[in-house]
Amino acid sequence: MFSYQAPQDLLAGRVILVTGAGDGIGRAAAHAYARHGATVVLLGRTLEKLELVYDELEAAGYPQPAIVPLNLETAAEHDYIELANQLQDTFGKLDGILHNAGILGPITSIEGYDPIIWQQVMQVNLNAPFLMTQTLLPLLRLAPEASIIFTSSGVGRRGRAHWGAYAVSKFGTEGLAQVLADELENISAIRVNCINPGATRTAMRVWAYPAENPQNNPAPEEIMPLYLYLMGPDSKAVNGQSLDAQGSGSA
Ligand code: NAP
């Protein structure tokens, strides 16, 4: 596991947007960021799940979160502009984005892959994070220093049979992060990195590996040290990296 002990006030005063915040790793990240002082903007497609997380954060006494219901499969440019305007009016800046929402799509061959589903997976996993990041960059520039984290996967670094659009979208995500990191290096206080969560006990993992015992994988809460490290100021000098949440690195 990536080893990092976050100070309690790591993210105090920061506004952090988490996509896919209603479940799995995104929900755990929303908790971890709020516990360390952040005002978390909970974005996802299922309002009831976002409301549950909202209530949990409020009950824990963390900074009051915000909810943005948005389906990344159908969201268009005007939705992102509206999101930017809302964040600008409410908070006046944005200190970080965790691009976490994702869908798996079918585990099937390229030859047999449904082209419509291919586009859906690419839209949610790659195109939406691009559009959202592009629209929110001016707000990120208003923060003293900001962090953008994209979510990759082992199959986004080495292709594997039958992982189709999911794997290709994660290769694209790695590329997007590298290009953006290089563009922003030295001309902004925004850093851009990728996290590969590794096998984690979530609904997506169970769907991908139905025969596996879920208890053999760490819970989302256990992989949070890297998510905290890359979002907080201790990683200020880290840019353009793709790191493993369950890897051997430490900070
Ligand atoms: P998960 O439990 O399935 O959660 C995915 C989240 O994304 C859910 O909150 C889901 O919302 C949201 N989402 C899906 N489609 C969306 C859409 N169209 N618009 C808005 N939100 C949408 O998956 P997870 O395991 O936590 O995965 C989180 C990230 O880690 C993903 O990018 C995944 O590729 C990556 N990852 C996971 C593993 C693993 O072992 N779990 C390994 C490598 C990489 P709903 O709950 O409303 O559906």
Image (cartoon, grey):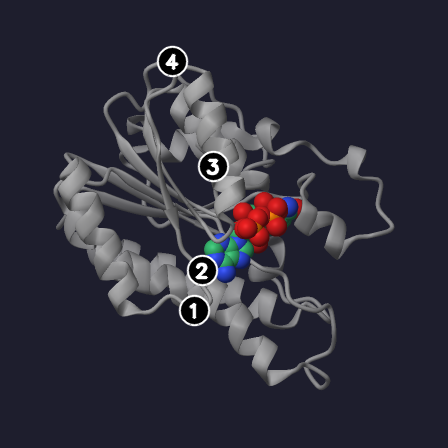
Quarter assignment of residue 33: top left
Query: Is label 1's Cβ within 8 Å of ligand 1?
Result: yes
Residue at the disc numbered 4: 8
Q: Is residue 250 visible?
A: no
Residue tagged 3: 51
Q: Does the beta carbon of the residue at mark 2 sit less than 8 Å from ligand 1? A: yes
Q: List x then y, in percent, for residue 195.
A: 49, 45
The CA distance from mark 2 to mark 1 is 6 Å
Residue to which mark 1 is pinned: 74
Q: Residue furthest right?
A: 211
Give the CA separation, mark 1 to mark 4.
37 Å
Looking at marks 4 and 3 on the same chain, the residue that comes earlier in the sequence is marked by 4
Which residue does the numbered mark 2 point to in the structure image?
Answer: 71
Residue 167 or residue 135, whichever sits in front? 135
Nearer-the-camera pick, 163 or 154 = 163
Residue 156 in picture, x, y percent from top left: 56, 61
Q: Nearer the viewer, mark 4 or mark 3?
A: 3
Evaluate if marks 4 and 3 touch, with contact meaning CB atoms under 8 Å apart: no
- Image quadrant holding the N terminus, namely top right
First in residue order: circle 1 vs circle 4: 4
Mark 2–mark 1 CB contact (< 8 Å): yes
Going by the numbered disc 2, the residue's amino acid type is: Asn
- Nearer the observer, disc 1 or disc 4? 1
Name the kind of residue labelled 3 in the image. Answer: Glu
**Is the residue indicated by label 3 positioned so its CB lies within 8 Å of ligand 1?**
no
- Secondary structure at numbered mark 4: loop
Residue 17, compared with residue 84, is above or below; it is above
Alpha-carbon neighbours of circle 3 within 10 Å: few (<14), some, or many (≥20)? some
CB at disc 4 and ligand 1 closer than 8 Å? no
Answer few, some or many: residues within 10 Å of disc 1's Cα (few below 14, many 20 plus, some between 14 and 19). few
